[in-house]
Amino acid sequence: MTRRRKILTGALATIAVIAVLGTAAAVRKPGAVPAAATAAQPAPAGLVEFLPSDLAEAAAQDLHVSLPLSGGLRALNQASVKAKVSGEVRQVLVREGEAVRAGQVIVRIDATEYQAKVAQARGQMLAARGQYENSRQTFERNRELVAKGFISKTAFDNYQSNLDVARANLDAAQGGLDVAQKALADTVVRSPLDGLVAARAVHPGEKVSPDTRLVDVVDLRALELEAPIPTADVARAAIGQAVRLDVEGSGRFEGRLVRINPSAVPGSRSIMVYVRVDNPDARLRAGMFAQGTLVLGHRAGVVAVPATAIRGDGGRAFVYSVENGVLAEREVRPGIRDEESGLVEIAGGLAAGAQVVRNNLGTLRAGSRVKLVKA
């Protein structure tokens, strides 16, 4: 009886184990992968899409080390023509924008009063000349008499004094005539230089006095740009350096540095420099705003990328490049920067022809597959 019970108990235990195993097999889905096997598989690489404009090629470029400049243009030769005598304006012979030549009459002032003064001064000069001639003849006659002893030396000295006074009176009268003639000539105002009339400040019938502004004349064949540069950079600036300028509405022009101010501007502590710009065809006008760069140095045939492609992480610089369709992170060594073109020299870490991400597009993952898409 005991033996039969043991056999029955063992059979029931065996049936229970088989039932448990069968239930586990029935619950498991066909094709399921064990958790351990799933964790062992690597995560698939990401995919990043770029537009063609998002990429730039590292290419050999000629770069310029430069300083930015900006300021207004002004005529190198210009004149504000002013009245030298007082009187009523009779004629203003030019208007704004007209071309004038040096010596051309531009304004006439009433000369009636000055003509009368010239006539008066001429009469005084002729009278003084007559007195001088009389004194001279008397002196000559008495010089022969004193030599023969007919008159005393004291009397002869008196004739000598009269001649000296007459000569002085003649010189004074001649000077008065010259002054009157100069004033009469100043009633006719002439242009001091070749150029264009920039402003007409008077009209016929107006009363003017000496130093009254009449007409402004500018010569546009040569212009000058006055611009500040930082004090720290003035040591690198030198006379004769090239300047590239962009003038609003007129395009690009070339100039050269001709002068450097010896003192700093109070407050800003900057140094003013002066750039000469030739303008033979008069495309530029005084007062136009210009901005450009002062070229301090030149590097030819260096590998360069846009400055926006370079990223910083602590003390290192790197770029994202596309290599065989995969995004890679390349550490680079930047060199000089061309302010005008926005390119930076890559002195090491990247070869010419490499494709780099042009702009900062956010966080990118090295090793991601790259796909180019149309805009």
Image (cartoon, rainbow, N blue to C red):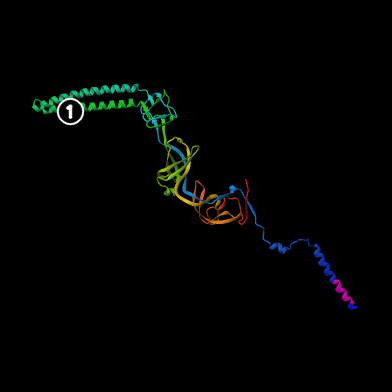
Query: Tag 1: residue type?
Result: Ser
Q: Quadrant of residue 316?
A: bottom right
The residue drawn where x is 17% and y is 28% is 161
The residue drawn where x is 47% and y is 42% is 245
Quarter that holds the C terminus: top right
The x and y percentages for residue 248 are: 50, 38
Q: Quadrant of residue 149?
A: top left
> Magenta includes 144?
no
**161 horizontally vs 40: left or right:** left
The x and y percentages for residue 19 are: 84, 67
> Residue reaching furthest left?
149
Q: Which residues are magenta?
A: 4-13
- The number of numbered badges drawn on the structure is 1
- Residue 106, placed above or below residue 260: above
Q: Secondary structure at mark 1?
A: helix
- Residue 227, placed above or below residue 166: below
- Residue 350, placed above or below residue 248: below
Quarter that holds the N terminus: bottom right
**154 horizontally vs 263: left or right:** left
Predominant SS along the magenta part: helix
- Residue 78, placed above or below residue 208: below
The x and y percentages for residue 37 are: 71, 63
The residue drawn where x is 24% and y is 27% is 171
Between 17 and 186, the one lying in front of the other is 17
The residue drawn where x is 89% and y is 76% is 5
Between 153 and 56, the one lying in front of the other is 56
**228 horizontally vs 29: left or right:** left
Residue 268 visible (yes or no) = no
Residue 16 visible (yes or no) = yes
* Residue on which disc 1 sits: 161
**Label 1: how many residues lie within 10 Å, few (<14), some (14-19) or many (20+)?**
few
The x and y percentages for residue 57 are: 55, 50
